Amino acid sequence: MLVGLGLARRVGRAFGIGAQVDAGQAAEWQAAPVAAPDIGAASAAEAAATAPVAMEPVGRMRALVADDSEINRMILRTFLDRLGFDVTLAATGAEAVALWEPEHVLLCLDIEMPELDGVSALLRIRDEVAARGIAAPLALAVTVNAMTQDVTDYMQAGFDGCLAKPFSRNDLVDLLRRRWDVTV
């Protein structure tokens, strides 16, 4: 159990999320800046590839994040908040559909969620977008299932990109650049 919690702490730190872990107790997660991981003797190229992204905020646009994992929601909320988004969180696909508003310019939908999966949630939101005659939000599939055929299936279902878990802030920024002129 301690090994699992230690690993969770390292992963959280890599994503800029602190964790207080005491033996025999539940982990308490906090979205707060923590020191960057020690990259040791990594080459300059490796350091540049893993360095945190400095980015001008895209403005106070609205994003909807739906994932049944509280940790994944927290990571995405932290990344997006630091990029200047106001973030709405949902734990299921059905909740995402209920919370969606036309002002959400970004959707980050986990593919495998209870009640309603990410593809079905996107299709319902896209139907509402079409009925209202408004611009479609940028839709990102957030998933561990990111083999070539999986990603092709998500694109055919209407997603604009795939954010493969585990992901970095850089991965997210690269996908956001498809819609917005972000500076890093």
Image (tube, rainbow, N blue to C red):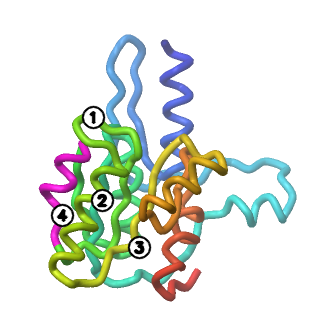
99 over 136 or under it: above or below: above
Identify the mark nearer the N-term, 4 or 2: 4
Q: Amino acid at mark 1?
A: Pro
Q: Amino acid at mark 3?
A: Leu
State the separation of the CA atoms marked 3 and 1. 28 Å
Kindly report which numbered mark, 3 or 4, lies closer to the viewer in this rendering: 4
Identify the mark nearer the N-term, 1 or 4: 4
Identify the mark nearer the N-term, 3 or 4: 3
Identify the mark nearer the N-term, 2 or 3: 3
For disc 4, the marked residue is 100
> For this view, does 127 lie left or right of residue 169?
left
Q: Amino acid at mark 4?
A: Trp
Crowd around label 3: few <14 · some 14–19 · many ≥20 (10 Å): many
Identify the mark nearer the N-term, 3 or 1: 3
78 over 133 or under it: above or below: above
For disc 2, the marked residue is 123
Report the magenta residues as a range.
Answer: 92-101
For disc 1, the marked residue is 114
State the separation of the CA atoms marked 3 and 4. 20 Å
What numbered label is drawn on residue 65? none
Residue nearest the observer in this picture, 24 or 168: 168
For disc 3, the marked residue is 83
Q: At x 76% / y 60%, what residue is drawn?
A: 47
SS class, disc 4 = loop
Counting from the top left corner in percent of width and height, residue 3 is at 56, 18
SS class, disc 3 = loop
Kindly report which numbered mark, 4 or 2, lies closer to the viewer in this rendering: 2
169 over 22 or under it: above or below: below
